[in-house]
Image: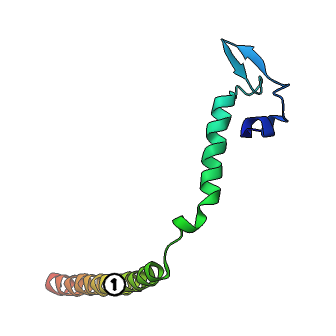
Amino acid sequence: MDCASEIAGGDHHGSTVRGGQEWLVPHTGIYPGELEQWCASATTALTEPQDARASPRATRLDRKRIKELERELLRKDRALAETAALLVLSKKVAAIYSRGEDA
């Protein structure tokens, strides 16, 4: 028994012919061929999960790379905070000196 027959309940008793093609479920517009294609894709995806899984070595390398990137991000975040603080201080110093010149 094919996948479309299993889903439709066996004998396509709910199917009708429209536009020269048999509809499996008339009110949804699903054709048996489309259902077979979907079923084959789903079956393939579900039967090969080990192939899609990363190897332990790749996982270890990925974790190492993530740690490196996190360290780099933290370093850049600290540098940005320091730059912002220096900018604020330089503006305050400039404001103090410009007020002193006006007086």
Whether residue 41 is situated above or below residue 84 in the rendered picture:
above
**Secondary structure of the residue carrying numbered label 1:** helix
Q: In the figure, is residue 11 to the left or right of 72?
A: right
Amino acid on which disc 1 is placed: Glu
Looking at the image, residue 20 sits to the left or right of residue 99; the answer is right
Residue drawn at (37%, 87%) of the image: 71
Where residue 19 appears, as percent x and y from the top left, is: 66, 11
Q: Nearer the viewer, residue 100 or 9?
A: 9
Specify how the rendered protein is coloured.
rainbow
Is 38 placed left or right of 8 in the picture?
left
Q: Position of residue 58 (x, y in %)?
A: 44, 78
Q: Residue at x 38, y 81 (%)?
A: 65
Q: Reply above or below: 21 against 33.
A: above
Name the residue that disc number 1 marks. Answer: 72
Task: Give coordinates of residue 43: x percent, y percent.
Answer: 65, 51
Could you say which is closer to the camera, residue 78 or residue 43?
43
Q: Which residue: 81% across, 27% down?
A: 12
Looking at the image, is 37 positioned above or below residue 63? above
Locate residue 72, reporting x and y percent.
33, 84
In this view, the residue in front, 17 or 89, is 17
Q: Quadrant of residue 62?
A: bottom left
Q: Residue at x 32, y 83 (%)?
A: 76
> From the viewer's perspective, is residue 40 above or below residue 85?
above
Q: Residues within 10 Å of mark 1 (few under 14, many from 20)?
A: few
